[in-house]
Amino acid sequence: MGWLDQVGDQVDTLSRARGLQESSRSTEAYRILSGVLATTNDRYARADALVQRLSAVVNLGRTAEYTRAIEEATTAVRDLTEPYPHGHLHALAALAAHHQGALDRCVMHLVRAARALGAVEDPDQDTAWGWHDLAMAYSYLSFHGYALGAIERARQLGLAAGIPAETFAAPGIRLRNAVALDHTGDSDGCLRVLRDIASDLAQFLHAGEAGRLRPSSLAAYGYAAARQAALGDRLEVGTNAAPNRLLSHGGDSARARDMRQLGEVCLAIAADRPIEAIARLDTVHVSTETLGAAEPDRLRSIAHGRAGEHVAAHRADRRAFRLAAQRNNRLRDVYIDGIAARIDHEEMRREAARFEGEALTDPLTGLPNRRRLERHIATVMAQGKRVVIGICDLDGFKAVNTCHGHHSGDLVLQRVAGVVNRVMRRNDFVARYGGDEFVVVLPGTNMAEAEEVARRIRSAVRTEDWESLVPGTPVGVSIGFAEVAATGPDVQDALSVAFETADREMLRAKTRPAPPDGLGAGPADR
């Protein structure tokens, strides 16, 4: 049974909205979806409408609405068991995160989208569109190989569901690959890819299938042709494949609007009107995410070169190369951070697997929960070991939820779980106690050693890049420690006393100024 079969009497309306978005008419789709949300209480219909509305918001480039749209869609999808809506939601959230410049969050959503879509047991046309949107997200992040694999998956699923192959032609994926090559100095490689894109369009035209191409695809074909001409490659196209005509397609897509503006610059260069091209570049306003931040400067370099202004051309080319290098460096950093996060996750997963079948793991962070924590402390104390517990309470977390919403709050909790777990020693134990409180258990440790652990935790949380995740709302941590003083039948009483003591110390830490060496938990840590 397909996903839309579960949305009841709204199936026709939701199908119409989906069709409008496929035709790059997202404004109309948005109105229809808002009407569905105002009239239905069916959870499947609401989930589908909210995921589709997020797609419309991304297509229209309404960045101010991204966070709220993601939060509402996440809430609607969270309790559904079907993997498809989760996969499509994360693919769209990855696109939104990329447009916001949050590359680490984008990568997280990409991984979750691929896992969820890959888990669909009976893939249909809806799943095909999920893979399509995932391919787009991969492409915008410059993971071109992954993008080509995902779009091929979409094409195969689409063919099985009766969707023509040209629907998932996705020339934009190869177009972004081409311009990325040019930004880093490989103009020959760029031209090879652009010529392949032109060849595909020629085949669709020859077979009479160009009319079934999506408007956004036509716009991408148009920009590819215009860019090829700007690089001095001669075009041999008919009227229907003229770049300016192709660029006029794309509907209300924000990315198609960007390509139209930059495409006019390319055509002015190709027509040997470089001064006009430079003047256009001075007035265009395009997203840096559509074709990369380096694209306007690279076009400016080509235009200056065509005008014989070689010093200006060289200067613009250097800017383009620097912007492309900065992007590659950020991708590298995200990749390295992703490896660290994967190690953290694997360690937590192995710990949770030891107690599989029992409700001992916090579902949000993957850490042991309160029940598992109490069992662990009892086990350690039964071995006759000294035990120190620490309560870690986040500072600034309320502001995160207020300013950015609970979805961002969940991301912060997940990040903190990984950060704290990463700085623990081999035999230490970390659990989520509830809300924004975490507990660390330090066996065989005295209070002086515990304070060193606290210093590492505070330093790691303080130096984490919160600005990219929740801009303007820094996150810190206050920590209080206590020793569990008893064994035998009084363990539970001793544990209660220790928690009360640690909690009091944590509250004191929130108001205590930080000493000069930075070991305290005063305002500087918050």
Image: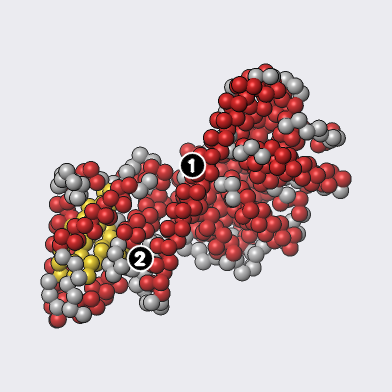
Query: Along the horizontal axis of the image, is 438 left or right of 115?
Result: left
From the image, tell me which residue sits under label 2.
367
Q: Residue 101 carries which label?
A: 1
Among the 4 quarters of the image, the one containing residue 29? top right
Work out whether residue 152 can be spotted.
yes
Q: What residue type is labelled 1?
A: Gly
Residue drawn at x 12%, y 75% is: 486
Mark number, residue 139: none
Tag 2: residue type?
Leu
User: Could you tell me which secondary element the residue under label 2 belongs to?
Assistant: loop
Disc nearer the start of the sequence (1/2):
1
Q: Which residue corresponds to the image point at 75% horizontal and 26% vertical from the top-left? A: 270
Q: Is 434 or 266 nearer to us in this picture?
A: 266
- Residue 83: x percent and y percent? 55, 64
Quadrant including the N terminus: bottom right
Is residue 36 visible in the rendered image? The answer is no
Q: Residue at x 65, y 44 (%)?
A: 177
- Helix, strand or loop at label 1? It is loop
Q: How crowded is mark 1: few (under 14 residues within 10 Å), some or many (20 or more)?
A: some
Q: Check if mark 1's residue and mark 2's residue have beta carbons within 8 Å.
A: no
Question: Gap between marks 1 and 2, in whole Å?
Answer: 28 Å
Q: In this view, does 134 lie to the left or right of 387?
A: right
Q: Would residue 176 appear left or right of 238 to someone viewing this image?
A: left
What is the tally of numbered marks visible in this picture? Answer: 2
